[in-house]
Amino acid sequence: MNEQEQLMDNLLNVDLEIIDVVRELHQTNWDSMSLKHQVGDLLKIRDEMVQKLMSQKGDDHSCDCGHEHTHE
């Protein structure tokens, strides 16, 4: 598995963890500050991973779906 594939795999894992924490937060009626902070921390990690993934691609904004994507 190359570095880009590893990053994508890690990104998927972070996304799944975010979903799990949001579900748990929903079950507590959105009343847990520690879970809210955990979601915030996970979103920061996710943003950093996406930024790193996009920087590896350089100016190539294609994802092989046939559409042009721009990320700012």
Image: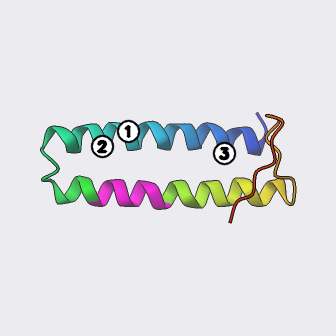
Identify the image quadrant of residue 41.
bottom left
Q: CA distance from mark 3 to mark 1?
A: 18 Å
Q: CA distance from mark 2 to mark 1?
A: 5 Å
Q: Quadrant of the N terminus?
A: top right
Point out residue 8 in the picture as x, y percentages from the top left corner: 66, 41
* Mark 3, secondary structure of its residue: helix
Q: Is residue 52 left or right of residue 65?
A: left
Q: Quadrant of the C terminus?
A: bottom right
Q: Which mark is in front, 2 or 3?
A: 2
Q: Residue at x 70, y 60 (%)?
A: 71
Residue, far front = 67
Q: Start and end of the magenta stretch?
A: 37-44
Residue 42 in magenta? yes
Upstream in the sequence, badge 2 or badge 3? 3
Point out residue 2 in the picture as x, y percentages from the top left corner: 79, 39
As drawn, 17 above or below 56? above
- Amino acid, disc 2: Val
Q: Which residue is mark 3?
A: 7
Q: Residue at x 23, y 39 (%)?
A: 24
Q: How many marks?
A: 3
* Mark 2, secondary structure of its residue: helix
